[in-house]
Amino acid sequence: MTGYPPDPASLGLRESHTFDRATIAGIQRAAMTGVYDIRGGGAKRRLPHFDDLLFLGASMSRYPLEGYRERCDTDVVLGDRNAKYPLRLAIPVTIAGMSFGALSAQAKEALGRGASEVGTSTTTGDGGMTPEERGQSKHLVYQYLPSRYGMNPTDLRKADAIEVVLGQGAKPGGGGMLLGQKISDRVAQMRTLPAGIDQRSACRHPDWTGPDDLAIKILELREITDWEKPIYVKIGASRTYYDVKLAVASGADVVVVDGMQGGTAATQDVFIEHVGIPTLAAIPQAVQALRELGLHRKVQLVVSGGIRTGADVAKAMALGADAVAIGTAALIALGDNDPRYADEYAALGSAAGFYDDFQDGRDPAGITTQDPELAVRLDPAEGGRRLANYLRVLTMEAQTIARACGKSHVRNLEPEDLVALTIESAAMARVPLAGTTWIPGQGGLL
Amino acid sequence: MRYEQEAGARGRGSEAEIPSDRATVEAPQPFRIGESDPAGTPAGAAGAGASTAGTASTVTFDLGATTVRALNSELHAPSATSYEVLRPQGAHAIAAGVHAPLTIDIRGHAGYYCAGMNDGATITVHGNVGTGVAENMMSGLVRVRGDASQSVGATGHGGLLVIEGSASMRCGISMKGIDIVVGGDIGPMSAFMAQAGRLVVCGDAGDGLGDSIYEARIYVRGAVGGLGADCVEKEQRPEHLAELAELLTAAGIEPVGEYAPGRFRRYGSARRLYHFAAHNSTAY
């Protein structure tokens, strides 16, 4: 143990749960700087999540499929309600919206390469579409955000789908920010902003204010793109039941629901940890809203926020999602928080596995940066291969579970295949507590 | 400064009784261009959805008889260079997404997002418009002979947008390089987070003008209800007077007398909110 201080608990010291070390450090930091903590990533607090659910698997009452021989399909069609050209993806795992600006051009290209290799989509972000990203992405979803940074009709027509962003899980109700360290000349030029300023993105769209207006906005987007492209609406999970109903009423072909574990490039820590609801709590609300409208599976549901494994994919789909989106996990697949940069993380006052200063632009892995010397560390082709590998693993894991539950398509997984380990997760996911028939809260309105 | 509606333009009955929906507004005082503009001489309008009646090169769409979809579909893959839209009836997204140097005359009132994302066309609305006219315009010229609702020219990147009447709130919100000239007044929260471009207001501006403004420049001839966070009045230097004269001229207003550049005041960013800092906490 040379070099490590002794465990305080071994000395009989007791840490406060209320004022733990992270809380104390937060107070000290606030007192020192006078500015709130801005960081990247999603909620770090422990939350009811997919880990709290288990699949029952088949036995006497249900037939399983053979693990390696029997077919279990994974394809998904997104946005076939109105669009002439819906997205036809080979796997139900997509790449979530992340901006050029938040990420390097190389990282955006790597995401496109990885997604395209396995036949799924990637998504732009605040700040517009880069040629690298478009060129390497077979299916590219173009985000339409409140700031409209870099938004132009030429790129809109180049997109394969359009995602109207109302919010994200890390900060429902909040706009974006990109600190000056990351506003390189190219980023500034794309966003029509002076280089080096701390850039704020609006939280409200500039030319519509409610669902009735959004319906007209979506009509305009369809008109401009000649009714060719699916229109997604992305919401941060909060009042999900109502928001999904209104999104569909506004004309969404696909609804994307992002839970509070969903990541961000730069948001106040207080916002990330205290606003929004967990992904697990949001999915059943969204599915209920779609079912009541008679549009479940007709308006597709994409879920994001804390998807890490094929088990998470399978559980989200069993609860009623048509597909999932990954952001944080995709960055980790590219090399984020890699222990080989341990010394450099330490020099930044962080550590591999803990690094979340995506706002700072000094990412040793070269992903969340605009510093050319750091960015060059990520080879887009190699990053793309790693991401493709990871996406294949997610898919195979989800198929493994689906076959075990007797399903010939991952989409056929259903809530009846699931039980919950905790009362909280049973109530949120609306599946019975394991070994019981008890679904807490069943019978209530929501 | 207020434009006058023609007698009979208010409280009309069925749109179908008015074949052309023509000339609902007249150019307000400062706009010289209106005097030579035959605001209401539509080409053949009767019945057909689209026709080439009238001048040989002008294609006419009657939205009383055909759809916005048919119109926009044609405008996105144009077979002519000049178009006329009759009986727009307040429809939304009229002439949205045009990306060719067409001339389009809309004879009547349009709804939301008229000329949305225009890229290169010259579009004139001979009437009033709803929310978001010429939103995110890239290039070209959009002229509204009447009044406009909210979010005029929102997020526009380029081109010139002229509102001959007045505009409601959020005029020029988040503008990114577009030039906007308003003959009358503008409502509150205009030029919010305006990034680049010029906004010229010949009348008054409402509360919260230029809140969180970046590098856009605002010129107001009349009173300002109040300035938003980080927006300040700035000195009118010769280059500003010169660019204002150019903008007024381009909009069809002679920059003399009542409309001389010296009658306007200039507003822009104090650039105090460009970096997060503890002492700005009350501003964000």
Image: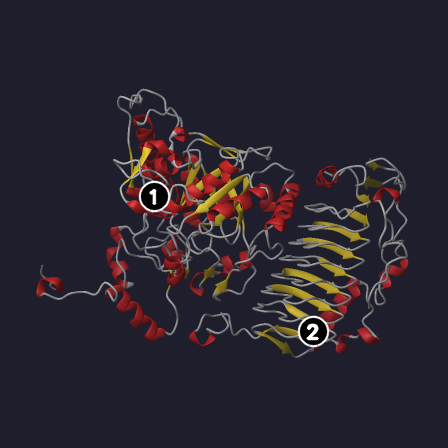
Report the amino acid beneath label 1. Pro
Task: Indicate the position of residue B20 as horizontal and vertical percent values.
Answer: 87, 45
The quarter of the rendered structure image containing the N terminus of chain B is bottom right
Task: Classify B221 as above or below A258.
Answer: below
- Left or right side of B250 for B208: left
Marks 2 and 1 in Cβ contact (< 8 Å): no
Which dot, 2 or 1, sits closer to the camera? 1
Can see residue A49? Answer: no
- Left or right side of B131 for A21: left
Closer to the camera in the image, B240 or A431: A431
Q: Which mark is residue B267?
A: none
Circle 2 chain? B
Closer to the camera in the image, A357 or A378: A357
Q: Quadrant of residue B170?
A: bottom right
Task: Indicate the position of residue B214 as horizontal and vertical percent values.
Answer: 57, 67
Q: Name the residue rendered at 83%, 74% in the picture.
A: B256
Closer to the camera in the image, B96 or A152: B96
